[in-house]
Structure formats: structure tokens, C-alpha cells
Image (cartoon, grey):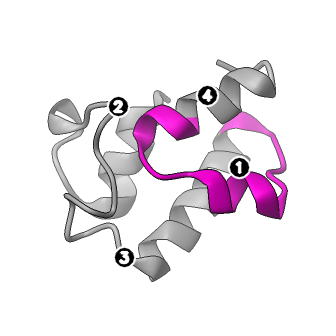
Amino acid sequence: MKVEEIIGKILNIDSTTIKDETSPENTSEWDSFNGLLLVSELEKNFNVKFDIEEIIAVKNVGDIKSILKKHKVL
């Protein structure tokens, strides 16, 4: 499953509208609770474990992709 598909599923939005710039600042569905669900779902789907610094550093979808690349799963 692609990052955008996971985000779309968790936030209940159309995954084709998700861009690297999509963030909690411009997506009302991306609240703190959905943010936690998103971390959990990403960890499960990509079989990785994010540390707290990585989670805090995420400001948008592009950041998520960069962290997943750092973990060599994207």
C-alpha cells in the first residue's frame, strides 16, 4: 500500500488529492488522534518503528516519505 493510500484511509479523504505538501495545517481531518492512528498504520504497513524525534519532526506528507526512505522501506 502506498503512503497516500494509507493517509487517505486514516483521514477518510481521497488519496489522489494527497500531495507532499499535505499537512495538518491544510487538512482538517489530520488532527492529533488521526496523527497517532497514522503513525501506527504506517509502522504496521512498512514494518518499521519510528522514534519520537521522527514523529515530532513530521510536518507534512513529504516528511513522512523522507523518514520512510531513511528506514529504507520506500
Query: In which quarter of the view is residue 6 placed?
Result: top left
Residue 65 in picture, x, y percent from top left: 55, 29
Query: In which quarter of the view is residue 39 placed?
Result: bottom right
Residue at position x 39%, y 48% from top? 7
Tell me, yes or no, whether the two marked residues, 3 and 4, touch with CB atoms within 8 Å. Answer: no
In this figure, which residue is indicated by the disc labeled 3? Answer: 31
In this figure, which residue is indicated by the disc labeled 1? Answer: 44
| 65 versus 13 height, above or below | above
Mark 1 or mark 2, earlier in chain:
2
Residue at position x 70%, y 35% from top? 46
Q: Nearer the viewer, mark 1 or mark 4?
A: 4
| 38 versus 14 height, above or below | below
CA–CA distance between discs 3 and 1? 20 Å
Residue type of the residue flagged with mark 1: Lys
Residue type of the residue flagged with mark 4: Ser
CA–CA distance between discs 2 and 3? 17 Å
Residue type of the residue flagged with mark 2: Asp
Residue 17 in picture, x, y percent from top left: 15, 36
In this figure, which residue is indicated by the disc labeled 2? Answer: 20
Part of the protein shown in magenta: 46-64
Residue 34 in picture, x, y percent from top left: 43, 72
CA–CA distance between discs 2 and 4? 10 Å
In this figure, which residue is indicated by the disc labeled 4? Answer: 66
